[in-house]
Amino acid sequence: MDLSNLEIKRLDHTRILMYSHDTFGLGHLRRCRTIAHSIVEHFKGVSVLIISGSQIAGAFDFKARVDFVKIPSVIKLYNGEYDSIGEYIDIEEILEMRKLIIQRTAEAFNPDIFIVDKEPMGLKGELEPTLEMFKETKTQAVLGLRDVMDSPKLLKKEWTQQKMLEKIDNYYDAVWIYGPEHFWNPLKGFDVPKNLSDKLRYVGFLDRENQSVPSNEGHALPEKYILVTAGGGGDGIAIMEQVLAAREYDPQIDFPVVMVLGPFMKSDSRDRLRLRASRLANVTLIDFESRMEVLMQNAVALVGMCGYNTFCEVLSFDKKALFVPRTKPRQEQYIRAKRASEIGLSTMLTPEEAAIPSVMAEALRNLPNLKLPSESLAAHDMAGLDNICTEVQNISECQKSIPAKVEKILEPQRA
């Protein structure tokens, strides 16, 4: 979204509360931050508060009128269960603390709009009391869903057990899907009732070109390079080692490579990568960069796992990309990478294919021959932030034109 010729509008005294559960990686917080920044750039008089469980929320910079409240962090284990970060704090205590902090924050902030990222009821249902409370107030609740959630079979099994569609219809006034309708339907396989279907809005991918992008300050980088990134890096060791193995297999592939390890990569994995990279020419390792746009702008191509944010950055900066998607425990990245490959936006290898050095080497050699994503994008595919701002304005104007719901948040309890 280009704001240079955009008339900045006023939505005086409008408050937007956002929720990002953040148990693994950086995707949810980064997506919320991108949306929040776009809204405050688009409108004067709007304040945005993000509730986040990210361990490193404080490592990111936030624009004026955007702030965050940190709730206790939990980690998602590979078996799908959750655990507390603190060794001596029980997970049930952590979950209760999170629920109470969320509800008290919502009471105090009293938002006009509540935007929830991906998890309709929050982590382990922690949002349900807050959503129930908002039903009796002016607050409009909006659920934001990624373009791809998971395989239809797995998501349907999970959500049917939780009666999730009924809860979404009950608690949410709108559902924004962060992708174009022709790309993927995140509710594919569900029999979506008409009342809920009427609330769905495909807003498009979230364009990152509206962000202020400084030079590569703080990093001694080549002028041009292939960027290798695995988001937070918690499970990023494999793709890094696969690229290094390809370089070892074919030393003639010596175009500069910049690898971003991510804040959640284990220290022994970092040490192993640094030792291996030190034996190769033109390989630069960076531990963490909170502004990936800084590194993306000078990359000639990207190798990544096809998380939502990385995918949007590839499309926004029009970069050729090779994706090696995660396939467990969710198939979100695999479905996105496969669909993108089918329509010519990027190419992909399965993790099994990428583990063969000769196959990865061939894929790296072919990167310069790929089409640019812009050659396959439809006209309004990247209009997500523009459309979200339009939705925010429409909600605000509707709230002014209809009687407010009965306010009960701050009323004293009567016997």
Image (cartoon, rainbow, N blue to C red):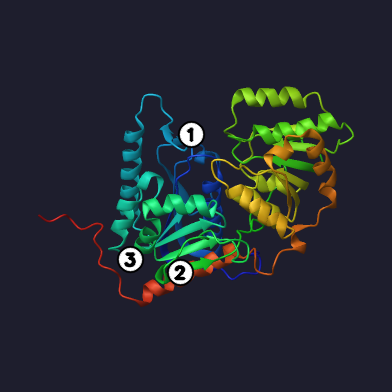
Foreground label between 2 and 3: 2
Q: Residue 124: give its label.
A: none
Q: How many residues crowd mark 2 within 10 Å: few (<14), some (14–19), many (20+)?
A: few
| Residue wearing tag 1 | 77
Give how far apart the Cα atoms at labels 2 and 1 are: 33 Å
At which x and y percent is residue 63? 54, 52
Pointers 2 and 1 in contact (CB under 8 A)? Answer: no
User: Looking at the rendering, in which quadrant would you find the C terminus?
Assistant: bottom left
Give the residue type that dot 3 points to. Answer: Lys
At which x and y percent is residue 80? 47, 38
Residue 385 found in image quarter: bottom right
Quick one: SS at disc 2? helix
Pointers 2 and 3 in contact (CB under 8 A)? Answer: no
Give the residue type that dot 2 points to. Answer: Ser
Q: Residue at x 78, y 24 (%)?
A: 278
Give how far apart the Cα atoms at labels 2 and 3 are: 22 Å
| Residue wearing tag 3 | 138
Q: How many residues crowd mark 3 within 10 Å: few (<14), some (14–19), many (20+)?
A: some
